[in-house]
Amino acid sequence: MRYAAAALTLAITAVFALSLLLRKKRPSVWGRLELRDGTSLELKNRESLVGGSPSSDVCLTTSRRRVPEGVIERDGSGCKIHPIGKKSEISVNGTLIKKAAAAADGDVLTIGGAETVFKSAEVLPEKARAERSGGLYLLLVLALCGALFSSFCFVLKPSDFTPYAIGFGGAAAASVLLFIVNRAFGQGAFGVDAIGLTLSAIGMSVVLSSSPRSVYKELICLAAGIAIYIVLTLFLRSGAGVRALRRPIAILGLALIVFALLTAESILGAKNWIRIAGVSFQPSELVKIAFVFAGAAPLYSVFNKRNLIVFIAFSALCVGSLVLMSDFGTALVFFTAYLVTAFMRSGSFATVALSASGAGLAAVIAVTARPYIAVRFSSWGRAWELYNEGGYQQARTMTACASGGLFGLGAGKGWFKTVFAADTDMVFGLVSEELGLITAFSAVIMILLLAVYAAKSINGEKGGFYAIAACGAAAIMLAQLALNVFGSLDILPFTGVTFPFVSNGGTSLIASWGLLAFIKAGSASADGKRGG
Amino acid sequence: MRKLKRRAVSILLIAVLIIAGLGVFSARLYNDGGAWAAFKGNGNVYSSGRLKTGSLLSREGEALLHFTKDGSEYSEDADTRMSTVHVLGDKYGNISGGAASLYRDELISYSFVNGVYTEEGESVRLSVSAELSKAALLALDGRNGAIGVVNYKTGEILCMVSAPTFDPEGDGTDVTDGAYLNKFISSGFTPGSVFKLVTLTAAIETIPDLYDRSFHCDGACEVDGVKITCTHAHGDMKIEDALAESCNCTFAALAAELGADTMADYAKRLGITESFTIDGARVSAGKYEGGGEFLPWSGVGQGRDLVVPASMLRLVSAVANDGLVPEFSYKYGGSGAERRLIPEDTAQKLALMMSYSVAKTYGRENFLGLSIAAKSGTAEVGGGREPNAWFVGFSTDESFPVAFVVMIENGGSGTYSAGRAANAVLQAAKNLF
């Protein structure tokens, strides 16, 4: 039984990694641009950059200029063409366009002087492939829930079983439910769901070990998280609706964070908790979802500098508010997501370098003006020297990691849970101690694989919006992961952020599922049947 | 879209950094995991800083100290408890350098693969014999001091008793001044004539005609203007008789001839004034001061010289083992490491003279059934108190390779009081071989 959790998490990680490695899906052709000389250029991506520059998706060598001229977007059976920049030279049937214009089969598109004829191609609906691995994932996740429950049973009296049975029973039920929904909507790509479920099951073990009474709260939040996940993934399938909601959601997010700044209670150093009707939550967690929405953009608007400036301003407001709330960890998470998103949108190292140095300067000013901030980071790298002071938590996290060995002491059998924040900021130590390093490392690798999944799913079948959103969401998870794990192990400064899905914390769990929706939506296979 | 795909490398870069971070952590865990797990804050193996798993066994295999969730349990036999408490350490950490803290990495049974997971605690078998320890405590006969016995081939410490001692399971009323002190490794005492071994070593190596010389003693003499006295007039003698008779005049003159720097150099080389460790437990350094008026008496082991019993034991172990001394260890089987303390031929010369001392002065009949080489010491401590009694040496029998040090505070004559205790301990030690 001691080896079961390690074996199962390792198996789920391996299956997911393998499916990523083997996944090779090429988008099919939905249109063509035919040139005068008879050559024909295929349109495969939902959004394709066209122009004379060699880095364009569709490169017109006969074009006068060596720059991208516009973006051709698939629109029903026809297409929409978006000019990029003021100098763009695109005309549809001889009329120079300055705004997006529709084009139909047979229309003449002149791009940078190169004359082409748009021909639409019929896309053959591919047979929805049965997701064979979906069942296997479900089986493994259910087995993991069972294994974790049995592990607890070894240290419990039968009369105390109830919360544990409810916790893992609930997690198992949620897994089955998600599997059914996934099948019902023909979504496929259950691997992503399985990763979320596996990490949530590990999180359930953490909650049950450290505070069994919180299991009901955890279950409710898991249910809410999965509900948001289902709604978001389904909603994200409708391209136009998503774009329309982008701005309102961004404004809502900003409003939430400003509201938090004004009213939030200070709990344990960071002033980022809001209490409504006896339920306290961290608004910054939910703002992560809005942030991803705000950062994502369709390909054609990526080339509009004004859009980027708006996004930079939005990010600065978010990060700034978090710093004012003394929540430096979350501020760093947002900043990382901002850097990745800004780079995805601009491709400019200058923007990234400028932002980073700007933030660095701001940090120096902040530390100079408020020296107590520096004190919080002064124990970094000296955990063993200050093991009963500033390095208290980090030293004990390392001790917990060493104590568990590869297979752990068994769920509920560790000591580390009695250390303050072991189930949240230092959860890597708790998982290592009780479930072993293999499980803890697997949990980390699962998040890394989600990032690889997000990066790999940019194969053009879905537009720029999804690609940027998926990578933005992945960046948030990676930043949290790095700060949580390495902060508690004294490799990075200890800032106190949560490990996605695994840390005990309701809002964090809900937000993790919300972010996961973007990663799943980034992949076309999540849409099941094509052409939807 | 091709551009976006390329730019997505940015998140893969973060992922790679995280993998690098995991690498750093794994390397640290691999190297320092044992120390992390043995950290006293680890509630899996400690309760309020006290171990809750593992056992320390005697050489004979009996449990000397057993750690449980509810606390620690010492041997059921009170004499065993009192004679081994300085080896093991007490419940509250008053005794430093106890085996319970030296071997805690092993007691918590840490391994990289299993962490501290264990069905039942790990036991560590010590080299220390419960029977020999009891015999040594008995030989001290209520007097303060220290007795150490070591296997000079393996470095295993067979017994280490320090007195005054106390019962670690007791209520604390028997704890007297100095009971928490492990005098074998932590206390420096005026060595008296046992220090002549240091002077002799320096003389053998630096005075070419030492063996050809004849020394004369009238019972008192003046060296460098300092008056030196002997127990009686030794007359004319060779160096080996000077050692056997423990002639102060001879050794004071040798010290004066060698000079303070040479003497200090040998005291250091022979490990007398250097600190060393026994499985991580620090042995205090002794002291040598031979400047000015102290020089003549310093060669006799009086004046300001201080020697820690463990260092003296190490020195005679090296003499016994042709100059090589194995690293001392409290663990069964020893540590396996050794270093050269004395050149081989010098060690052999010293051994021969120490054997001769037993034959001529201490009397073989006082060590029946044993074949030993030794040096006694009767160290004046002043203040009207009895001198400290020393007796150090080793068995010359290859099948019984033990070296010993006996130091009895205010014990009187080295030969009679410490020598007798040494005999009692060695007779008991024979049972171990």
Image (cartoon, helix red, strand yellow):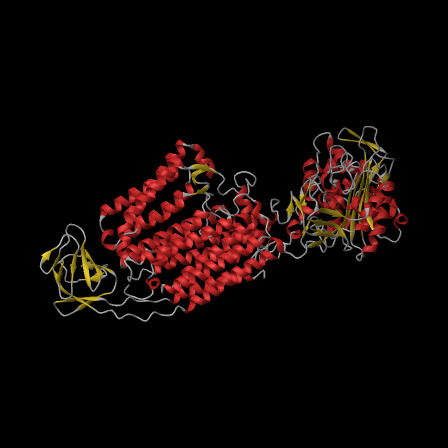
How many numbered dots are placed on residues in this image? Answer: 0
Q: Quadrant of the N terminus of chain A?
A: bottom right
Residue A441 visible in image: no
Judging depth in this view, the residue of A216 and B19 nearest the camera is A216
Q: Position of residue A234 (x, y in %)?
A: 34, 58
Residue at 36%, 54% in the rendered image: B11
Check the image and report above or below for A240 versus B50.
Answer: below
* B195 left or right, relative to A7: right
* A187 left or right, relative to B292: left
Check the image and report above or below for A85 versus A37.
Answer: above
Q: Which picture quadrant has residue A408?
A: bottom right
Q: Position of residue A18 (x, y in %)?
A: 42, 65
Judging depth in this view, the residue of A151 and B75 nearest the camera is A151
Q: Quadrant of the C terminus of chain A?
A: bottom left
Residue B383 visible in image: yes
Q: Position of residue A164 (x, y in %)?
A: 55, 54
Judging depth in this view, the residue of A474 and B208 nearest the camera is A474
